[in-house]
Image (spheres, rainbow, N blue to C red):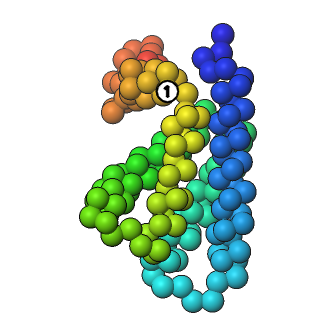
Amino acid sequence: MNEVSLSRLYLLRALYLLVVVGLAINVWPGVIHHDKWEFFEGVVACMLAAFSLLCMLGLRYPLRMLPVLLWELVWKTLWLGIVALPQWRAGHIDEAIMPNIVACSIVVLVYIAIPWRYVFAHYIKELGDSWSLPRLSAGRPATEGVR
């Protein structure tokens, strides 16, 4: 029995594809043909390029690559709540911050696409990996019992 429906897997793949295509159009030309970057401009461009490569893996392995989407969801939600919302409340939304608000607001699609029951079952409820190797005992391999 599959824990996540086929339609949800296709929705995840569509989201990964949206990220890949969007960043291929907006980020990769600058990565390939950059002249000189300011420090943070280079950091952001390289991080987004790496994110797009990981999202390519998500096309093939949509559930295994969920942590990448969860990272995207967390940082964009934090930015919207900690940076954009106070600026909006203070009436300081200008043309410099508005494109970032629009780009980060697309995080709504991530909230919709994530299979939340799967995330809860596999990242919250399930036991984590062992912090140490089990002791060797007579006749028993060291890796037996390690999850």
Answer above or below: position of 53 versus 128: below
Q: Residue furthest bottom?
A: 36
The number of callouts visible is 1
Q: Position of residue 115 (x, y in %)?
A: 55, 27
Answer above or below: position of 44 versus 21: below
Horizontal arrangement in the rendering, residue 118 relative to residue 55 (left or right): left
Q: Position of residue 129 (x, y in %)?
A: 40, 29
Answer above or below: position of 57 versus 63: below
Q: Position of residue 83 (x, y in %)?
A: 33, 61
Name the quarter where the N terminus is drawn. top right
Which residue: 66% across, 46% down?
16
Task: Choose between 86 and 71: the one closer to the eye.
Answer: 86
Name the quarter where the C terminus is drawn. top left
Q: Residue furthest front?
A: 91
Task: Choose between 143 and 7: the one closer to the eye.
Answer: 7
Which residue: 29% across, 59% down?
89
Q: Position of residue 91 (x, y in %)?
A: 31, 66
Which residue: 61% across, 64% down?
49
Q: Is residue 123 visible?
A: yes
Task: Choose between 31 and 84: the one closer to the eye.
Answer: 84
| Circle 1: element type | helix
Q: Residue furthest top?
A: 1
Residue corresponding to mark 1: 116
Horizontal arrangement in the rendering, residue 119 relative to residue 113 (left or right): left
Q: Dividing the picture into quarters, in which one does residue 45 lie?
A: bottom right
Horizontal arrangement in the rendering, residue 134 relative to residue 16 (left or right): left
Q: Is residue 83 visible?
A: no
Label 1 packing within 10 angstroms: few (<14), some (14-19), many (20+): few
Q: Type of residue at label 1?
A: Trp
Which residue: 57% across, 63% down?
48
